[in-house]
Image (cartoon, grey):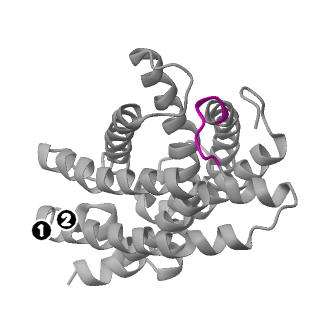
C-alpha cells in the first residue's frame, strides 16, 4: 500500500468488524452496569443506539488514520484481508497463522488467569471477570468478539502505528521499517496504555487501589506485549484470533475456575 493512501475497502471491512465487536459487548455491559443504567436520562435502547453511532464515527476516524500510519511506518496491517481483496490465494497465509495464534492465545489466557488467582484473589468478586460468573455463558462469549475485533483493530492498527510513528520521530530514526529499539519502546508504551485503559471498566464497580492499578498493568500488559509481537510476525488477523482465544479462556472458562 502506498504511504498516506487509504484503501477504503479495507477501512470499511475493519470498521464493520470493530462496530460488530462493540455491539457484541452490549449484552454483557448491560448486565455489568445494570444499576447505573437505571438512572439513564433516556431509554436504554436509545442509549445503546447513540453509543453505537458515536463509536462508529470515532472508530472510522481512528481506523483511517491508523491505516495511513500503518502504510507509512511499514507495519504488517491486515495482510490476510488485503490478499483476499486483491484476489490472491490466502490458504497458505491462513494456515501459517493458526497455530501461533492459538498458542499465543492459550498462553496469554493461562498467564492472566494465574495472575487473577494469585494477585487479585480478594478483589475478584468485585471485578468484571468475577461478576461474569453470574451472567449466562452466551453473553461472555459475545464479549470475546469485542477484544478480538474492536480492541485489536484499535490497538494494533491505530495505537501501535501511531506510537511507532511518534517514537521514530522523537528518536529521528528516519522512515525505514521500525527497528528493535523503536519497536520495543512503542510496544511497552502500548502495553501501559492498554493496561491503564482497562481501569475504566473497574472505576464504576469498586475503589481503584494501587493493587488494582498494578494488576491492570501486569495482566493487560502481558497480553498486549504478546499480541503485538504476534502482529509483527503474522499480521492483524493473527493477533485478532489470539486475542479472541485468550478472552475465551478468561471470560468463558475463567469465571467458573476463579470463583468457587
Front in this rendered view, residue 36 or 124: 124
Q: Residue at x 19, y 65 (%)?
A: 115
Labels in figure, total: 2
Q: Which residue is mark 2?
A: 115
Indicate left or right for 160 with 189 as reference.
right
Q: Residue at x 83, y 62 (%)?
A: 88
Q: Is residue 14 visible?
A: yes
Rendering coords of residue 165 (x, y %): 51, 26
Front in this rendered view, residue 110 or 95: 95
Rendering coords of residue 182 (x, y %): 40, 31
Q: Residue at x 56, y 63 (%)?
A: 238
Q: Which structural element holds mark 1?
A: helix
Is the C-beta separation of discs 2 and 1 under 8 Å?
yes
Front in this rendered view, residue 38 or 58: 58
Where is residue 125, by image quadrant? bottom left
Q: Which residue is mark 1?
A: 118
Where is residue 105, by image quadrant? bottom left
Q: Which residues are magenta?
A: 71-77
Amino acid at each position: 500500500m502506498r504511504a498516506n493512501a487509504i484503501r477504503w475497502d479495507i477501512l470499511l471491512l475493519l470498521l464493520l468488524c470493530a462496530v460488530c465487536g462493540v455491539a457484541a459487548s452490549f449484552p454483557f455491559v448491560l448486565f455489568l452496569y445494570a444499576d447505573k443504567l437505571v438512572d439513564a436520562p433516556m431509554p436504554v435502547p436509545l442509549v445503546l443506539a447513540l453509543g453505537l453511532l458515536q463509536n462508529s464515527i470515532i472508530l472510522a476516524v481512528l481506523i483511517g488514520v491508523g491505516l495511513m500510519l500503518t502504510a507509512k511506518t511499514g507495519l504488517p496491517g491486515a495482510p490476510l484481508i488485503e490478499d483476499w481483496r486483491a484476489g490472491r490465494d490466502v490458504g497458505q497465509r491462513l494456515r501459517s497463522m493458526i497455530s501461533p495464534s492459538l498458542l499465543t492465545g492459550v498462553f496469554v489466557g493461562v498467564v492472566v488467569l494465574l495472575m487473577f488467582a494469585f494477585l487479585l484473589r480478594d478483589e475478584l468478586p468485585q471485578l468484571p471477570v468475577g461478576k461474569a460468573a453470574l451472567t449466562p455463558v452466551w453473553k461472555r462469549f459475545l464479549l470475546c468478539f469485542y477484544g478480538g475485533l474492536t480492541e485489536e483493530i484499535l490497538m494494533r492498527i491505530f495505537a501501535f502505528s501511531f506510537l511507532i510513528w511518534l517514537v521514530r520521530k522523537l528518536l529521528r530514526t528516519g522512515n525505514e521499517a521500525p527497528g528493535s529499539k523503536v519497536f520495543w519502546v512503542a510496544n511497552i508504551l502500548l502495553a501501559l496504555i492498554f493496561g491503564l485503559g482497562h481501569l475504566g471498566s473497574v472505576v464504576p464497580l469498586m475503589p481503584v487501589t494501587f493493587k488494582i492499578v498494578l494488576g491492570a498493568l501486569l495482566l493487560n500488559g502481558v497480553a498486549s506485549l504478546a499480541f503485538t509481537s504476534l502482529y509483527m510476525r503474522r499480521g492483524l488477523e493473527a493477533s485478532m484470533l489470539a486475542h479472541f482465544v485468550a478472552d475465551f479462556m478468561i471470560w468463558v472458562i475463567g469465571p467458573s475456575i476463579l470463583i468457587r
